[in-house]
Amino acid sequence: MHASGTQTLPTLLAQKTLAHPDKTVLVFENAQGDVSTLSYASLSLAVNRLCNSLVTSGLEPGQSVALMMGNCTEFLVSWLAINQAGAVMVPVNVFYAPDELAYLLNNADCVAFISEPRFLSVYAEVANKCPTVRIQICGRTDDVTAEFQLLSDILRDGDATHRLVTIPPEAPSQIVFTSGTTSRPKGAIISHLATMLQGIAVAQVLGMNPDDRSCVVLPLFHVNAQFMSVVPTLTVGGTIVMIETYSATRFWDQVRKHDCTLMSIVPMQLRTMLAQPPHPDDAVHRVRLSFYALITTDEEWTRFEERFGVRLVEGYGLSETLGICTCNPAVFGKVKRHCIGLPVPGREIRVIDEEGIDQPSGKPGRIMIRGHPMFSGYFKNPEATTACMVEGWFDTGDNGFFDEDGYLHFFDRSKDVIKRAGENIAASEVERVLNEHPKIAESAVISVPDPLRDEAVKAFVVLRPGEVIHVEEIQAWCLKHLAKFKAPSFYEFIDALPKTSIGKIMKYKLKQRDKDGTHQKTDL
């Protein structure tokens, strides 16, 4: 038995509702600045109504429900209701193009689709290609939409009886699609057991308590917002402060107005906050720390902490590890700058060489992880699951090293992944789309520095003999098949890609060539 016992996400909500029904669980500020709140009892009531509606509509335990919504109250209600019905939530990146959405719906065997009006046009393009989807619900509107049930009707008139479909803790809670090195995202299965254990672990690492008010401004379809903020806050019975959209001019005022005590940000947000005019009250607030990931400069780090009076605590993780698997000890130890810290409770970390031998301190090697919580494997992809595990250790594909205190430091990525404003982009996925264009013979995609978003996408393109193409045509093709953040920002047309004797593209030579600056920028 694990530290969470037999608890699941729905039983956690029921437990906290019983303990303090009138306490505020959610403060939500939408893009227009309107603020609404929910108590634990009100949240549970809404979850009951949607859960019962889903079950009445034929949703069965273990079936998948795609959830394509921005940050909003309805996202949280839907997530919990899907799980209370014993079903599996599949969060959808709201920037997905139709082709990507169709792949997710079919790959995850989704039988239901819950969304909001602004994404219905994307779904409409692929609905006839997704035959398993038979339950369609639209939230955040009162306008009747053909073939869609209105979530507002369900939450107003639905059966409020508390019914919980009993499932084992090992049952899937959600399937998170992650961009690794493959041309298509893989669905990482996350169980209720893993969810509960991560909630406990993160709460311990950050020293969380029931008085905490955790700010969620990163997207809920990613594990950072879910497992650095939502789940640990529910674990301790605290309050979630959810912001629909990030605005550099408004964010810090929102954090202070809502008395937030914790938050999680990425470099793009840190840099745009620093770019705002200083205010005498910038350091007057209740925030005791902010989780932070990805490298920034010493100068930016110091300016942020001194101006805003917020301690940055860095860590490291992946979708497969439910967010952080290492973190600086914010409560019980020393916090080191530009260091991803120590293993969180339940995890073990190794750094090994190519022969699987543990590396001494100071020497980089592959980061390997084992323990709980972890993902349960890739959905319908046993080959990929087997490939990422080495004698019980998960191969992250990233390189790092330990220092003399046993703290882990990130070194580089061995995976062909581009990190853009907190989003992972598989180079091979972009290459697949480019190579499917009838005028393109082959392509290679690399990362290039971006002063705001860390990395940008650059594509080297080889055309088929006799073909002529403009950048705008390629970009339109990419935007049709890829989320906008994955589309290249730079292009370079070349006669041939540099390759090894066995035909492998030598991307290091392309990166060296890129230093000459011979690229053509797209107009995004």
Image: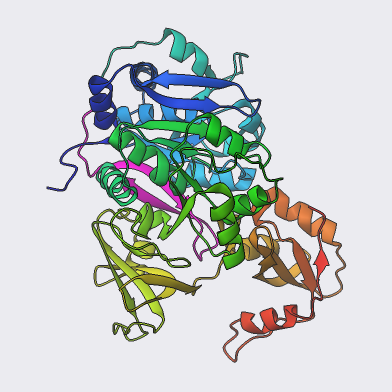
Is 74 left, or right, of 209 in this rendering? Answer: right
Point 51% across, 23% down: residue: 137
Relative height, residue 109 to residue 46 (above, below): below
Is 313 left, or right, of 500 in this rendering? Answer: left
The stretch of residues the image draws in magenta is: 165-190
Is 375 left, or right, of 15 in this rendering? Answer: right
Q: Position of residue 225 (x, y in %)?
A: 46, 43
How has the structure been colored for display? rainbow
Which quadrant of the structure image shows residue 466? bottom right
Q: Does residue 69 appear anywhere in the picture?
A: no
Of residues 385 and 267, the one drawn nearer to the viewer in this rendering: 267
Point 40% across, 11% down: residue: 158
Q: Does residue 81 appear anywhere in the picture?
A: yes
Which quadrant of the structure image shows residue 76? top left
Relative height, residue 4 to residue 320 (above, below): above
Point 50% across, 71% down: residue: 415
Q: Is residue 168 magenta?
A: yes
Q: Is residue 330 magenta?
A: no
Q: Residue furthest bottom?
A: 501
Q: Residue furthest front?
A: 280
Q: Position of residue 129 (x, y in %)?
A: 57, 39
Point 59% across, 42% down: residue: 282
Q: Residue furthest top?
A: 157
Is 121 left, or right, of 518 in this rendering? Answer: left
Q: Position of residue 219 (x, y in %)?
A: 53, 42
Q: How many marks?
A: 0
